[in-house]
Image: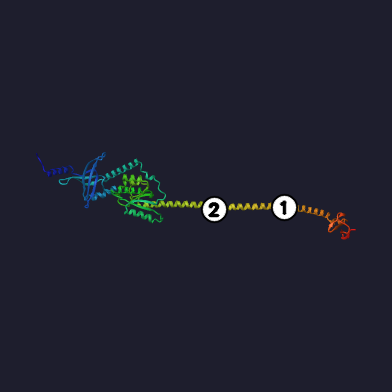
Amino acid sequence: MTSITLSELTEQIQQTVRLGFDTPVWIRAEISELRENPGGHCYMELIEKDRDSDTLLAKSKATCWSSTYRMLKPYFESSTGQSLRAGMKVLVAVSVEFHSVYGFSLNVRDIDPTFTMGEMAARRLQIIRQLEADGIVDMNKLLPLPRLIQRLAIISSSTAAGYGDFCDQLKNDPSHFAFYTRLFPAVMQGDQAEASIIAALEKIYERADLFDVVVIIRGGGATTDLACFDSYELALNCAQFPLPVITGIGHQRDISILDMVAHTSVKTPTAVAEFLISGLQEAESQAEDIFSDIRSVIKNRIENEYRFVDQTKMRIKQTLRSWVVQKTHLLERHKSRLQSSVRMQLFKQNNKLLLLEKNIDTHSPAFLLRHGYTITTINGKRITSSKQVKQGDKIRTFVPDGDFESQVN
């Protein structure tokens, strides 16, 4: 039986690999692990999974030495807007190597960013279609935006410059509107960002009645740090959140999926602050217009009331003047009738007096005396019968020109 040593075997394998793969090979794979060491080298683990069952089909270690990595990394990031990370699908040119001690390995020599961009676009499109199929893309947009937005639940990194700019913009605005802010700190980039932001949303949900809106902000930075905002789970949580979500992620590229499902999306944290301030300014302006309309209505009403009062006073004066004139004429007529009546009564009474006077005169002793009669009295009483006197009585007799006494014989 023929035998060979292990080194002879590994040398044959090494020769076979060298002959079979004398030039770099372009392979499609997914990065399952990636780490950079202080020396600048990048160590990866590349895998391939079955599309249908997600079963692992192949796995291999890969190394990108610092001399190559220093060129490939910025080229890839500037082309894709993303940093190399676990979970990303790549098309890389590798040299296949076999070492008698370290075994099989791949040495990354080049990378095609257009492949990854296509994969990213496909993944992004897949997430968007899934959200549309779930019927939640516009769910948050359908929430009514409060008329006065002042109670803000903010998701950001506490040390982020964008958060500071946002707060400064609210604080230093000349309008001096009052905003009540509470920060819910979260990691805003990297692999932990998605879970951290969702955790912050869950904390806000427990106190949702204390806030008007949720503000998700992130300051400027590398575009490569924004992959977390193209997450299905994050978009799902924001789309279904019971408060309107306003985003200001601080990027200039195409909007993220988070921007798509948010109620309102602006470019930067400062722009979010300006949006909130402009909302209150608009409400203030409308309130002033309403107050102005109310003042005009009240003023017009008061002026109309004054005019009505003046017109009423004028009508009352005219009515009173007419009434006085009528009453004066009536009084004059009554006075005239009264005077006529009084004159008539006086005339009648005067006639009665004259008749009475004449009647009295005709029945008075003086009338009798004037007509040749005499009047005889005894003790001041007129004698109308001889029986009233007796012999010896003294009697007085009145004649027209005087009187005299006599004694009865």
Figure label count? 2
Measured from the top left, where is residue 123 in percent x and y? 30, 43
Q: Looking at this rendering, what residue extends furthest in the left direction?
A: 1
Q: Looking at this rendering, what residue extends furthest in the front direction?
A: 391
Q: What separation in Å lies between label 2 and label 1 (alpha carbons)?
A: 50 Å
Q: Nearer the viewer, mark 2 or mark 1?
A: 1
Q: Looking at this rendering, what residue extends furthest in the right direction?
A: 409
Amino acid type of the residue that numbered disc 2 sits on in the rendered structure: Glu
Task: Kindly state the secondary structure of the residue where label 2 is placed.
Answer: helix
Measured from the top left, where is residue 45 in percent x and y? 22, 45
Residue 292, above or below 131 = below
What residue does disc 1 label? 338
Amino acid type of the residue that numbered disc 1 sits on in the rendered structure: Leu
Q: Tags 2 and 1 in contact by the CB under 8 Å rule?
A: no
Measured from the top left, where is residue 6 in percent x and y? 12, 44
What residue does disc 2 label? 303
* Disc 1 packing (10 Å; few <14; some 14–19; many ≥20): few
Residue 399, above or below 147 = below
Of the 4 image quadrants, the one containing the C terminus is bottom right
Measured from the top left, where is residue 235 in percent x and y? 33, 45
Q: Quadrant of residue 20?
A: top left
Which is more toward the observer, 82 or 173? Answer: 173
